[in-house]
Image: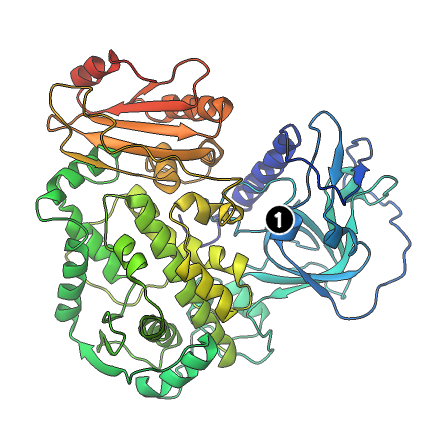
Amino acid sequence: MSPHLPKSAAAFVSLTALALLAMLIVWMQPQDATRSNTNVTSLPPASAPTLAETKAIENTPTPTGPPVRIDFKLLDETKQPDARKMEVVYPPALEALDGNLVELIAFMAPFESLEDMSECLMLPAYVGCFFCAPPSFTQVVFVRQKDDGRPKKPFIEAPSLVTGTLRLLKPGSSDPAHEMEMLYVVTDATVVPYDGSNAPARVPGHWQQENPRAAADAGLPEKPQPLPPMKPEDLVPVIAKLRGLEIKKPIKFTTYTPAELESAVEVRINSRRAAGGWAAHQRVWQTLGFADEKDDLRLVLRGLTLQRIIGYSNAAGDHIRYNGDLQLTQPATRLELVKVIADALLRQNHDLRHLDTALHGDTNTDARLAATAVFQGDLMTTARLFAAHHRLRDPSPNASFAFFGGYPAAKTALQQLETMPWQMGPFFTDQFAPNGEPMALNDLLQKPPTTTAAIIHPTFHGRPQDYTPVEVPSTFADALRDSKPIATGILGEAAVLVWLENNAELGPHMSAADGWRGDRYAFWQDGTLLIETHWLDEDEAAEFQEAATTQRPDFTVIRKANSSHVHLIGGPEAARAELHKRPFS
């Protein structure tokens, strides 16, 4: 997954079409029962006007007063009580804001053309983030920007702050977007990059190299400008105040040589598994298509990690070591050091052993990635608060800090999997602590999600009535063959999606993976791999079965009629055929 823009406008339009298609598909799905204190709104008959058509829009007074902050969690409370009727139920809090000034933090997506965002869509996740699920019909906001004299409005890659008048879809609406059955329209809107402060004066950051057009529109220099020198110790009280943490112990700072940092990363990666477990793990990853047989998986992971980190805090949070070859006057490097200091302060203030257990374990890939995403989301939030405080550009989830040669290149699938926490963690955290509220962040650390499904679909978190993962026993395959498996583990929704795309660009089949509810794999000495997957219902299982059969001909895909389980068998063809004869539920 790449955080950068797709390479052509066509890619954007395709993704937007996918989002709209998902929106239409959801119209056909049953939704939760309505709340007793809400009224059902019947939708107008569908028609197909274009927004280029001139058509009168409601002549209502321009609202006054400060805007009310809304979020996608509130928008997602809109329900369709009966899939057979074009009716929706708005939550009372949202209904009360119809016709009022609102503001929303969201990600921009094109509606008709990437060249002009005068009319655009706003989504809960970055349009290039293929780990994010396609938005439902309640998560697409149509925005019509106010006329400010510019012939065209530019695309904004960063999270955006939208301010304007909210118009809800209701009978009799004459807005062209409403006639296309878009529930939410924000008119007379302004859209600006969101950084927590929206201060106009800003020191340029590294991201301009990735988005030169946006940098030029903002009148910023082409290259990042160095910051004034600052001792790492001087950053500690600033970060503690921003994150709402106490400095319980002084923090000692020392530097790594590049070789010492490589050794530290090696120790952490090796600690994920017992010494004898890596050989089987590498064979599993090879069968899945995540690793090459010729490369040592640990070396590949070490090379990936060294691109993303500059140092570590110890477990007590009182000693930080960082790469002494890096210049802390560079904005990107300083922001990364902010994250390491935030890590140390969190360890001084919170018991993070439950997170560390998941972070340093690897038999449950799902839990490891979820824990990493929560932790990275917290650290990135603190770095963004620091950036806003010091007028810096937001830190990039794709920043690379130093070059370490000699490491084998990672396959596309492994890159997608291992970078997921950096991409999705900040998105997940922002759903619960959009302004970096310390108490909300602390709640996420103490009660973190344990699956990547909850990271990809934040509305799942803390709602067991809507989402409870299935726990497949570790012994599920022990009796299927004469010998027991030599390795077992859990993949999770993110890894299943990566497997499904088979080292290609993420996105085309993500809807086939978003009904995931549980899995476990078993691997035998002869190279046979069995994966039992559980899905929300029979339809979700059938969709995944169809996609898996098409995308992964190297696997045998098994699903009984009317079952919500799908079994996948990889490895030697003869062993696959033999295991296929076994009874599966």
| 292 left or right, relative to 566 | left
The residue under the point 44% across, 24% down is 541
Q: Position of residue 257 (x, y in %)?
A: 15, 74
The vertical placement of 128 against 578, above or below, is: below
| 539 left or right, relative to 374 | right
* Crowding near the residue tagged with mark 1, few <14, some 14–19, many ≥20 C-alpha atoms within 10 Å: many
Q: Quadrant of residue 309?
A: bottom left
Image quadrant holding the C terminus, namely: top left
| 350 left or right, relative to 48 | left
The vertical placement of 222 against 403, above or below, is: below
The residue under the point 29% across, 83% down is 249
Query: Circle 1 sits on which residue?
Result: 110
Q: How is the image coloured?
A: rainbow
Q: Is residue 52 visible?
A: no
Q: Quadrant of residue 283?
A: top left
The residue under the point 42% across, 77% down is 245
The residue under the point 29% across, 53% down is 358
Residue 440 versus residue 415: which sits nearer the camera?
440
